Image (tube, rainbow, N blue to C red):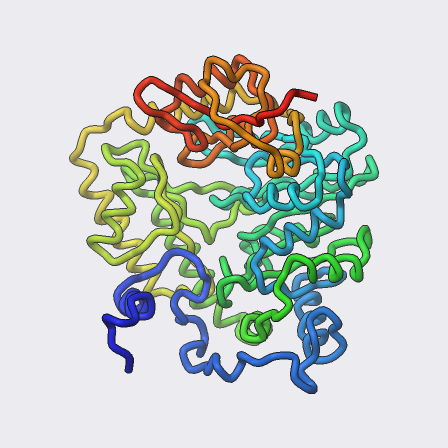
Amino acid sequence: MSNSNNTPLYTALMEYSMKKKPFHMPGHKLGSFGDMKQIDFTALDVTEANGLDNLYEAEGIIKEAMDKMCTYYGAQKTIFLTNGSTSGILTSLMVLCKPGDEVLIARNCHHSVWHALVLSGAIPIYIQPEYDESLGLMTVMSKEVIQEALQLYPKVKGAIIVSPTYEGIVSDIKDIAKVLHEAGKALIVDEAHGAHFGVSVDFPISSVKLGADLVIQSMHKTMPTLTQSALLHQGTDQFSYEHLVKTLRMVQTSSPSYAMMAMMDYARGYIEEHQDEIVKQYIEPLKEMRSRLVALQQLYVLDIPRDQYDMSKIIVFTHRTSIDGYTLGQYLEERYNIVVEASLPNYVILMTTVADQVKSLSELEKALIDIDDELTLKQNTNTADLYCSELTQVISELPKVQKGGYTPREVYYGDYKWCEIDHCLGKVTAETIMFYPPGIPILYMGEIFNEKHIQLIRTYAERLKGIQYKGNKINCKVLDIPLK
């Protein structure tokens, strides 16, 4: 055993795993799924030895494992990813777009999408998801916005959208895919938080089965696998499997982790073989817990129909109380050792997975009920309402469809300077400027400042990331080149 003072990271992780009750990713919940704690991971950490196949030229056991995964998810082809969904997103957009091609990009996409735009040289056309003003929450991508975008920019190659969102909101993928396919365009879905949808009919239907051409899933987020374990599914024959693998090879490690691939294979096999047990020990207790949490008096748990929402996510809003989301997250950890996935101004996100059972769910339920009982005696404030109002104002000022001035690739390789906000009109932003939290962009890198942008930046400077704000002076990073 090594000296704890000499191994700070290792020691901290071991202590964390012994004390905390995680309601965050990865989905194995510190190895509490199946018999994971008995698995010798060093036995799985091998390389492309004789008889062990090669991910990029799979013909043996890796191909067999991916074929079984493909069948489980109902895809045409499935590729293991060991650099997370990021590698799948990079691959998908690079296969879809050549330099100069236009593509529809949902404004709530993961930042890896902008890395893919830099690598591909594609031109983004930004599309805005719907927004719930009462909760301060980004929700679905509507087919109407995509139809509007296709009319304005008929040369786009396709679209990439997020479903489910971080909070579990699911878009109508079937209708969106139909709109895009009728126009001869492709649909890529970032389904990073939906790898578990096939576990139970109580979860939404995966985009893989609803017409999406490419679907990226992070198995490690909501399934019991190691961090960075992910999947790239082909839902149609729109793209060549060989082209996908060739591109993946460029953006993913040349030494893909056998431990990750093996654990994805293990998780899928275990879930298939223990379906009834999982329903009894996780699905049914989760449904029962949710039905009781709806009765909370001060806290509010998001509860909407199955086809629109992933019930494994427990989103607890604080807007009816005198505390904010940060305080709720703090209460849960300090008093109950329950660690949330994320704390935001007006809600927290708690992730449940197949690694949860009656015991962990009961502990969470009791903690929330105890806190809720305490809050009934306190008088509400308008802090969260003010936050939602400000966020609503920001969203209402953003266009549903917007083309940038320069591509992210041009911005990445361009020169920039800091410019005082009064002199930014008509200039190109070299840095994404977002309302944070929750991370909703006002301007993406490459977009052109207009008067509305400048007004929003002045109004909400204290809440923004991507600017320099000191005193009353606001500076923004802009490209130091003339406009096209």
The residue at 48%/81% (across/down) is 42
**Residue 475 placement, left or right of 98:** left
For residue 32, which quarter of the picture?
bottom left
Q: How many discs appear?
A: 0
For residue 48, which quarter of the picture?
bottom right
For residue 366, which quarter of the picture?
bottom left
Location of residue 22 in the rendering, given as x and y in whole percent from the top left corner? 35, 60
Query: 294 or 203: nearer the eye?
Result: 203
Location of residue 182 in the rendering, given as x and y in whole percent from the top left corner? 82, 37
Instruction: Check the picture and name the quadrant holding the N terminus.
Output: bottom left
The residue at 18%/42% (across/down) is 374
Location of residue 344 in the rendering, given as x and y in whole percent from the top left corner? 36, 39
Instruction: Check the picture and name the quadrant holding the C terminus.
Output: top right
Location of residue 270 in the rendering, given as x and y in whole percent from the top left corner? 54, 75
Query: 236 or 97: nearer the eye?
Result: 97
**Residue 30 placement, left or right of 53:** left
The residue at 53%/62% (across/down) is 228
- Measured along the vertical axis of the image, is residue 391 above or below residue 309? above
Residue 175 in view in this figure: no
The residue at 46%/36% (across/down) is 439
- Measured along the vertical axis of the image, is residue 209 above or below residue 265? above
Farthest residue to the bottom: give it: 50
- Measured along the vertical axis of the image, is residue 95 above or below residue 148? below
Residue 258 in view in this figure: yes
- Measured along the vertical axis of the image, is residue 98 above or below residue 230? above
